[in-house]
Image: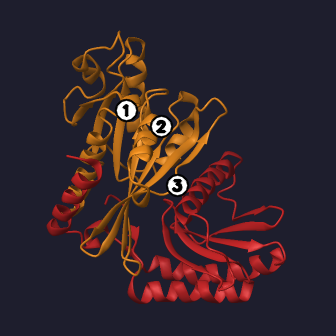
Amino acid sequence: MIEPTVALYGDAFAKAAAVLEDLIDQAQVRYALLVDRKGFVLVHKEALWAPRPPALDSIATLVAGNAAATQALANLIGEPRFNELVKQGEKQGLYVEEVNDLALLVMIFDNTTPIGRVKLFGKKAVAELDEITRSAVVMPRELGIDKDFQQSADAMLDDLFGN
Amino acid sequence: MSTINFANREINFKIVYYGPGLSGKTTNLKWVYQTVPGDRKGEMVSLATEDERTLFFDFLPVDLGEVKGFKTRFHLYTVPGQVFYNASRKLILRGVDGIVFVADSASNRLRANAESMRNLRENLGEYGLSLENVPMVIQINKRDLPDALPVDMIRAVIDPEARFPVFEAVATEGKGVFEPLKEVSRLVLSKLADGA
């Protein structure tokens, strides 16, 4: 609405989805998500063997908030950014890599998967996702939201939040 | 900034609850969470201290439903109100589509309301935004306090030109919680439909 945004659709969405699918196969991770810097999920894919994923909205929000805080920390010590973020628990890990100033790549993996493998294929995917997301930036007025959409949404707001 | 995902046919908006510490931002979100049916909301995430003061943010996704084939969602956030958490507050404003400013009616919080509004303007400015281009409504909360200041007095310090819609509220009882949320959602949609 106010700033340019990443609008993934058509070929761009298919390309990004294909990159994530390849990434899951090659890196052997459970889930791979492309999220924008504001905390919205742009694309996600999961391994066929993976259990139902946790709440992706929450993951995207927390990852984006964490990435923003991490970048602020980097700036405080005079670094432009820290490029990656790894969290490893007893059984699973989470790896976040900057795609660019628009998006982040998130992978959730089992600890049986070597972290080096996750990083290697993560960085390869980032190079492809960088180009895809940059080419998918649109201005708000190009989103296609019109008066019809607004009127329909208005009625639903009454329904959800009361008259 | 709203995010659209044509392949999944989703459109998402980010609404941020802003205001001084203890004005009731988290209480608003908790009321929405308690009231909205289970199939229309996601998990509420609260990053708070042990004494339930917001440390980073609260987050609640709410599904409006399908609008013209697009699953439409509002992502509601609160910021930490305490003055020294400004670095976190600024981060949450990234990509904001609309703001609910939650003011405190207590007589000793008039200055805090004014300072929070000034802080909001400054933080928006860091993203090249201003209250001229971000839809905002004001909720004047805690109207049940015995020493609640008159609405006009509070408005005079946070919105002297009377530019923004104002709603009185007692968020702990759910009064005046949904009206400002609905109004800011409408303003956001209207701005988009106008091609702003």
Q: Cα distance, mark 3 to mark 1?
A: 23 Å
Residue B31 image point, x, y percent: 41, 40
| Callouts 2 and 3 in the same chain | yes
Say which element carries label 1: strand
Q: Residue at x 36, y 15 (%)?
A: B145
Of the residues shown, which amino acid type is indicated by label 2? Thr
Q: Judge left or right: residue B183 versus residue B76.
A: left
Q: Residue at x 63, y 29 (%)?
A: B51
* B47 w.r.t. B161: above or below: below
Residue B195 in view:
no
Of all chains, the one bearing label 2 is B
Q: Cα distance, mark 1 to mark 2?
A: 10 Å
Foreground pick, B50 / A12: B50
Rendered image: mark on residue B26: 2
* B160 w.r.t. A36: above or below: above
Q: Residue at x 74, y 73 (%)?
A: A109
Foreground pick, B87 / B33: B33
Q: Residues within 10 Å of mark 2 (few under 14, many from 20)?
A: many
Q: Residues within 10 Å of mark 1 (few under 14, many from 20)?
A: many
Residue A2 image point, x, y percent: 32, 58
Write down the quadrant of residue B86 in the picture: top right
**Which residue was labeled with disc 1?**
B102
**Which residue was labeled with disc 3?**
B43
Of the residues shown, which amino acid type is indicated by label 3? Glu
| Callouts 1 and 2 in the same chain | yes
Q: Nearer the viewer, mark 2 or mark 3?
A: 3
Q: Quadrant of the N terminus of chain B?
A: bottom left
Chain A: colour as depicted = red
Mark 3 or 1 closer to N-term? 3
* A1 w.r.t. B145: above or below: below
Q: Residue at x 54, y 44 (%)?
A: B57
Mark 1 or 2 closer to N-term? 2
